[in-house]
Amino acid sequence: MKSCTRLCHHLGMTNAQRSDEGGFPFAFDLGDRLDKAMRVAGLTIDDMAEALDVSRGTIGNYRSGRTTPSKLQIKEWAMRTGAPLAWLETGMEPQDRPVNGLKQDVFEGITTAPIDIFTREPVDDVA
């Protein structure tokens, strides 16, 4: 474990990731996902502490994996950061990821063929 400590610290890994139990040491845990969600959303520790009505130290403990937020706090974290709740909870990527902010089914039936703007019928000959 001592030999990993310096590398793990350099990689920003939490104590939970430096497991001696044979787990994959580079796996992302809840604390890592909470941290990533904050960074992507551009939120500070102060922002999250205020949103969850906890101290800055508590936010740091959540991000480091020392303590675990409640289910309600994880939901609030997801709402504040825009991160998918399922991803925060499990680390699994959502199956129906949005494309440019729109769900995939929005694009069903859309064609790239030119249409007449008045009749909305396909146009065969484009001048």
Image (cartoon, rainbow, N blue to C red):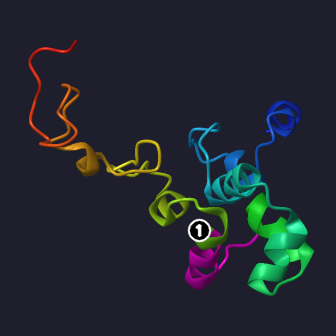
Identify which residue, 26 or 56, lies in the foreground: 56
Q: Residue at x 49, y 57 (%)?
A: 87
Quarter of the image with the C terminus in it: top left
Task: Tell whether 110 sits left or right of 59.
Answer: left
Where residue 8 appears, as percent x and y from the top left, is: 80, 37
Identify which residue, 48 or 6, lies in the foreground: 48
Q: Residue at x 55, y 61 (%)?
A: 88
Identify which residue, 79 or 52, lies in the foreground: 79
Q: Which residue is mark 1?
A: 78
Amino acid type at mark 1: Ala
Q: Would residue 63 be counted in the magenta stretch?
A: no
Q: Residue at x 11, y 25 (%)?
A: 123
Task: Tell whether 89 sits left or right of 104.
Answer: right
Quarter of the image with the N terminus in it: top right
Dominant secondary structure of the magenta stretch?
helix
Where residue 122 appears, as percent x and y from the top left, is: 10, 30
Residue 1's place in the image compared with 53, above or below, is above
Marker count (numbered): 1
Task: Tell whether 78 sits left or right of 47.
Answer: left
Where residue 68 appears, as percent x and y from the top left, is: 68, 73
Residue 18 found in image quarter = top right
Span shown in magenta = 67-77
Q: Residues within 10 Å of mark 1 (few under 14, many from 20)?
A: many
Q: Would residue 76 be counted in the magenta stretch?
A: yes
